[in-house]
Image: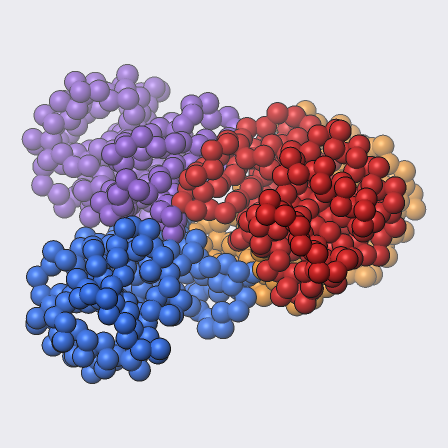
Chain colours: A blue, B purple, C orange, D red
Amino acid sequence: MKYGIIGYSGRMGQAIEELFSEAGHELVYQMDENGEKEIEKPEVVIDFSLKEAFADTVRVIKEKEVPLVIGTTGLDDTDFAKLDELAEKVAVIQSFNFSIGINILSELIKKVNKYVDRDWDIEISETHHRFKKDKPSGTAIMLGDLLERDVEMHSKRLGSEFGEHEVDFASIGEVLTLKHRAYSRKAFTQGVLLSAEKILDLEPGFYSFSEILK
Amino acid sequence: MKYGIIGYSGRMGQAIEELFSEAGHELVYQMDENGEKEIEKPEVVIDFSLKEAFADTVRVIKEKEVPLVIGTTGLDDTDFAKLDELAEKVAVIQSFNFSIGINILSELIKKVNKYVDRDWDIEISETHHRFKKDKPSGTAIMLGDLLERDVEMHSKRLGSEFGEHEVDFASIGEVLTLKHRAYSRKAFTQGVLLSAEKILDLEPGFYSFSEILK
Amino acid sequence: MKYGIIGYSGRMGQAIEELFSEAGHELVYQMDENGEKEIEKPEVVIDFSLKEAFADTVRVIKEKEVPLVIGTTGLDDTDFAKLDELAEKVAVIQSFNFSIGINILSELIKKVNKYVDRDWDIEISETHHRFKKDKPSGTAIMLGDLLERDVEMHSKRLGSEFGEHEVDFASIGEVLTLKHRAYSRKAFTQGVLLSAEKILDLEPGFYSFSEILK
Amino acid sequence: MKYGIIGYSGRMGQAIEELFSEAGHELVYQMDENGEKEIEKPEVVIDFSLKEAFADTVRVIKEKEVPLVIGTTGLDDTDFAKLDELAEKVAVIQSFNFSIGINILSELIKKVNKYVDRDWDIEISETHHRFKKDKPSGTAIMLGDLLERDVEMHSKRLGSEFGEHEVDFASIGEVLTLKHRAYSRKAFTQGVLLSAEKILDLEPGFYSFSEILK
């Protein structure tokens, strides 16, 4: 596949290039704060840049009319309206978290939540490296929102833990624990790769990452 | 609810009576190797006896025409044919494992298995008390059968661990762990109670415990 | 061994009798709110009663001049002064927690604490059943006091967990986790049994349970 | 500190340079299969090369008469005899595993082993990335040798786990778990840094890494 990256020099941009090139894909277009570089027209564009650069992304996709995989954070309703507009002509896959495991975990939590009633205790724990300042993590909050009740959250800050999330469901007789741990940034770039490979076969439209996983 | 127990003096029989009486239900019929005792006709019969006593169970249900919740182990095809026959007239709920958590875990494993491909590593671990002789546990084997491939199994035998089962799914970037631990025999009796309470509203027919949970 | 129990009808008293009789020891003296019953003079007396009954314990030990293993909680300085007085004539083993594992864990924490400097993160977690109201547990506080700094504490309340304590030590490169879980009340009665068996060979004096373990 | 690295271009050599330079130390000497490069005489030399290059290491230390921190694997009795010879004139710190956590874990295992008798179950588990071929890991075997009995070993191979080791000690009443996980190669380079910083104050002689930690 011939692909482009917007946000090329960022940490995710670099990690994406590394994984995509291992998988035999060819980088033919890149853009970042140092400007634009085009070798050839890409078949798909990946955007992990900043909200501030979003207007550029919209312009590039309109011009090239190629599918877009976008993981840029902080997008708001106005931005999503523009993605919907793009999605009339090309396929767009959007997510704030491209980890396959976290997306599966979300589906599992929703499933368990259907089985267990009020008499089950539910608590969420997460562990991240000592430099992470927000407590609890955004992902823990997102997981908590899937449950239809308030749950206790525990946040450990230890060493250089890349990111661990755990949900415990307990009745008087038993406890069921669902846990996810990212080993590295690859937890996220693999989901991007999967999306980029699948998007080539998709009809124009707006897709969430969890729809792609199904 | 007025209920009966076949296998009354066994460990599960005793544990069932304890939980059911806490829940306000009334034991009106019992049978075990010491004979039969009937105060009143039960609305439902629970059977946690032995395969050897199965003929008695069939006779009792035929006579009384009341629904049956059965967790007796070792039933074979001939026995199941007889349960099907009973199920033409009354509701029958059957399972080899009435733990709600293990049944939810089974559903989760099937779900994860749909998402992950061959490039994910899967391993199963279980821990039980030092006196448990079979390795791996029957439940670990049952969980392994849900995956469509051979998986490594690890069996720890430690102290008086009541029963812990864990399945790990790992890709290069991340690991997802599903774990269940039973605190006590209540892990199983609670599923029996749930079944007995629901069976009163069921049409005649044969039901698995996982159908009841849904 | 011929032994006596003060606090015979309490939960610990009952559990002690069960384990001691499995070990072949003979109960020859008992006292509780229902009064005193003496078959024969005991070789050792175990006290798991209430602070309110402590004056009786002192009187009994003075009269019989036999060694004492005491796990009664809530003793204050005045009470300890009386134990010291008894310890002039008989051996006295006292602890607020007779779990062998928790006592080993305490020794390990002190050892790790000598190795790790300020640049290591330390956090303590504990999980107990849903009915436990105090947060964090007394044992977690006791473990925290062994470290010479303030540490974050996390308390989960799940199902009927008997009691789990965990201490994490993490540097930038690695994490060391020490964890203890009690399966049942036996975690405590086994330490009492060990103490009762060893006390017969001890000189008069006051001993902590951790001294006995060494 | 002005330091040298033998085995400069290896993975450990590179990781050592990265950490030492973050800590403000200056690389003034290096050697590897591409040859030798000396800017200035080093105060200490670090050797993470190959057994095949050991003769060069001996020669360099003899010439320069500077202390040596050596983590090269595969050294045999003849090699150790040569290290002893060097240790007559300079301080030598040697270890096959410079992880601080694994060394603390070893000390803890020896301590627990003194407390627990034959009636405790002990099992060892380790998890490493899918590409690790040896089962169990060398470190698991080393930990097992600290116990004075045969223990069951469990080896999981999952994703890109950097390295996790766990030892469980269980009696009928309770279980004590000691677990170590390396986040990255820093788990090892930090121990090397500590050794290099301490060696400047040491008298000539042969030291193990665990002696340095005390």
| Pick the front one: A88 or B28 | A88
Name the residue located 19 percent from the left edge and 37 percent from the top edge: B208
| Residue C161 in sight in this render | yes
Quadrant of the snapshot with the N terminus of chain C: top right
Residue C14 is situated, as x and y percent measured from the top left of the image, at 61, 39
Q: In the image as oriented, which residue stretches furthest toward the right?
A: C88
Q: Residue at x 24, y 70 (%)?
A: A38
Q: Quadrant of the C terminus of chain C?
A: top right
Compare residues A209 and A3 and report the one nearer the observer.
Answer: A3
Q: Nearer the viewer, residue C165 or B11?
A: C165
Would you place residue A61 above or below residue D5 in this image? below
Q: Position of residue D109 (x, y in %)?
A: 67, 39
Residue D115 seen in the current view: no
Q: How many marks?
A: 0
Q: Measured along the vertical axis of the image, is residue A214 above or below residue C26?
A: below
Identify the residue at horizontal 76%, vertical 45% (top origin).
D60
- Left/right of residue D174 with respect to residue A126 in the rendered view: right
Q: Nearer the viewer, residue D135 or D145?
A: D135
How far from the left and from the top, in percent, is residue B85?
A: 10, 25
Q: Quadrant of residue D143?
A: top right
Q: Is residue B42 above or below residue B50?
A: below
* Residue A68 spot, x, y in % from top left: 19, 67
Residue C122 sits in which quadrant? bottom right
